[in-house]
Amino acid sequence: MENPASDRDRLLIIPAFNEAERLPRVLAEVAGAVSGFEVVVVDDGSSDGTADRAAEGGARVLRHPFNLGYGAALQTGYKYARRRGASLLVQMDADGQHNPRDIPGLVRPIERGECDLVVGSRFGGAEVYGMSLAKRVGGMVFRAMARLYGVRITDPTSGFQAMNRSVVDLYTSDAFPSDFPDVDVLLFAHRYGLRIGERPVAMNAGTRPSSIHRRLTPIYYTYRMLLAIWAVSARKRRPSGPQEARTRE
């Protein structure tokens, strides 16, 4: 039997940094695609009016005084959701890469009690997502590492996700990274016995260069991710039933 969350405790978290130009369109698409969610934009120290555009678009705005990083913006949203007592949370990017029409498909396995965390995979649908060779190789490496530790997800670097309260509680801990939460976070959830699934989604190409690919950041990102994966894998696993749930239909 399905047990959907009530409208008052469903949150959609959108971390944003200098997205004043793109955010209004994203919020309009959200409004046209889903209902019953409180939309929360976490302005990560933007200097271009992102917070104003978010408020004009009807979103609740949480603001950082300066740029703290993508992971910190997400965790601000998680902590707000926890204080609100939210039982279901969806996160998506502010640059138009994620399609709000895919949100119902992401949350359905959670509503049915099949998963705790659902990842939107750009590789599971009919449309082929265009990526550079470097990104494809990197994705293959991290996908293989995730599978090595038991997380069988085709797109472990996807930021388009839905989760229940158990995941939110875990992600508000000090162990959540402030810079680049990625496959290491999925492994973190997996080691704590949370059920992880995925759904195919349509994704657009990013509208701006990712901060991960600037200057020496790729080297730091790769080093930090490998170190984080090793640290998470060394944690004692907390079994609590099936670890992965295939949710494709």
Image: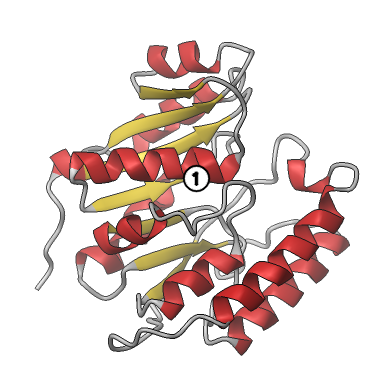
Q: Amino acid at mark 1?
A: Asn
- Indicate whether 245 appears above or below 34: below
Q: Residue at x 58, y 18 (%)?
A: 20
Return the residue at label 1: 99
- Indicate whether 155 appears above or below 174: below
Q: Residue at x 46, y 36 (%)?
A: 14
Question: Looking at the picture, how far across and down is residue 171, in whole percent?
Answer: 41, 56
Question: Looking at the picture, how far across and down is residue 115, in whole percent?
Answer: 31, 72
Q: Quadrant of the C terminus?
A: bottom left
Q: Nearer the viewer, residue 45 or 129?
A: 45
Question: Looking at the picture, how far across and down is residue 176, in whole percent?
Answer: 50, 56
- Residue 249 visible in the snapshot: no
Q: Is residue 196 left or right of residue 235?
A: left
- Indicate whether 224 appears above or below 172: below
Look at the numbered disc 1 and give the secondary structure of its residue: loop
Q: Quadrant of the N terminus?
A: bottom left
CA neighbours of label 1 inside 10 A, class few (<14), some (14 to 19), many (20+): some
Q: Residue furthest right?
A: 215
Instruction: Count up the numbered dots.
Output: 1
Q: Nearer the viewer, residue 128 or 209?
A: 209
Res 211 → quadrant? top right
- Residue 139 visible in the snapshot: yes
Question: Looking at the picture, how far across and down is residue 95, in whole percent?
Answer: 60, 34
Q: Residue at x 51, y 36 (%)?
A: 15
Q: Is residue 213 left or right of residue 198?
A: right
Q: Nearer the viewer, residue 160 or 236?
A: 236
Q: Residue at x 11, y 64 (%)?
A: 3
Res 27 → quadrant? top left
Q: Is residue 120 left or right of residue 36?
A: right
